[in-house]
């Protein structure tokens, strides 16, 4: 099976899970709304104070506030992603998840998600700070480091949600799982990203067309299309993340939504066949 075809099959399988539990689409929407509200709560005092943003020079207190904002936004994103993983895990294991059960699953790991959000926010800020100070070559290197971090820690969240491990142990286990299945799992992740890009093209076209024609309707439809594509791809990514966890940990994906031979082609193991349970 070719790499592109493998990515398509995995996307189709993830779509079948999503079709069985359409309520999971509400989780990326809630995440987006919570993000907007949070940014608004932090931004309103700045605008209300009449601060001139062009001459504004943040001090230590402002930088601390920005870090808190970054951390809160990271926690919001991770919490709702954890709910998505919880719901997908329930479906793959024969359950019938609801929005409430998915949120309860995330809430049960709220204390363990918190330090992971702190680590994620800190790493992101450090990489962004280095990137702003680096030259072109340095930015490329730092970008690659960021991509490597994202790939190696891709399974941290399902490990925390499903197994209840702490951040340190979850990162170690995610790294071990990555070493085992490092092969072409990158192809599948990139493939899903490419599918998301293709899904967004019509929306970008409508948006550009609306802007060029000064059509509010066209702009609105384009924005809605892009938002819908982002919501669906976010849900599919969380489902895929959960399925990959099961395959990496158990050698199979329960539920009958995914064909093991598809995963076997996408995630070729190294010679070490030990399971990381």
Image: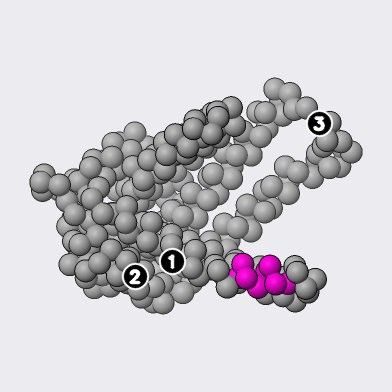
> Circle 2 — which element?
helix
Q: Is residue 112 left or right of residue 219?
A: left
Mark 1 neighbour density, 10 Å: few (under 14) some (14–19) many (20 or more):
some
- In the rendered image, residue 52, in percent from the top left (x then y), is placed at 86, 36
Residue under numbered circle 3: 56
Mark 1 lies on a secondary structure that is helix
Q: What separation in Å lies between label 2 and label 1 (alpha carbons)?
A: 8 Å
- At x 84%, y 42%, the residue is 47
Please say whether residue 190 is visible from this viewpoint: yes
Q: Which residue is mark 1?
A: 195
- Closer to the N terminus: mark 3 or mark 1? 3
From the viewer's perspective, tell me whether residue 27 is left or right of residue 246: right
CA gap between label 3 and label 1 equals 41 Å
In the image, is residue 42 above or below residue 219? above
Q: Is residue 196 magenta?
A: no
Foreground mark, 3 or 1, reads 1
Magenta-tinted stretch: 203-210
């Amino acid at each position: 099976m070719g790499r592109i075809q493998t990515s398509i099959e995995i996307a189709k399988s993830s779509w079948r899970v999503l079709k069985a539990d359409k309520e999971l689409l509400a989780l990326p929407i809630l995440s987006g709304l919570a993000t907007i509200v949070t940014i608004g709560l932090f931004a309103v005092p700045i605008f209300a104070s009449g601060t001139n943003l062009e001459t504004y020079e943040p001090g230590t207190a402002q930088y601390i506030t920005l870090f808190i904002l970054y951390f809160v936004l990271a926690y919001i994103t991770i919490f709702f992603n954890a709910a998505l993983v919880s719901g997908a895990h329930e479906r793959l294991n024969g359950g019938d998840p609801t929005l409430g059960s998915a949120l309860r699953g995330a809430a049960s790991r709220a204390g363990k998600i918190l330090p992971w959000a702190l680590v994620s926010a800190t790493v992101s800020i450090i990489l962004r700070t280095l990137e702003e100070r680096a030259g072109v070559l340095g930015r490329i290197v730092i970008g690659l480091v960021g991509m490597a971090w994202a790939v190696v820690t891709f399974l941290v969240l399902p490990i925390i949600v499903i197994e209840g491990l702490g951040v340190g142990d979850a990162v170690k286990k995610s790294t071990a799982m990555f070493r085992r299945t490092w092969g072409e799992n990158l192809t599948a992740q990139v493939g899903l990203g490419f599918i998301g890009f293709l899904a967004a093209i019509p929306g970008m076209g409508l948006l550009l067309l609306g802007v060029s024609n000064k059509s509010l309707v066209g702009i609105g439809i384009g924005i809605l299309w892009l938002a819908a594509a982002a919501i669906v791809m976010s849900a599919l990514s969380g489902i895929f993340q959960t399925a990959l966890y099961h395959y990496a940990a158990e050698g199979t994906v329960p539920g009958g939504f995914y064909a093991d031979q598809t995963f076997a082609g996408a995630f070729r193991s190294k010679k070490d066949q030990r399971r990381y349970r």
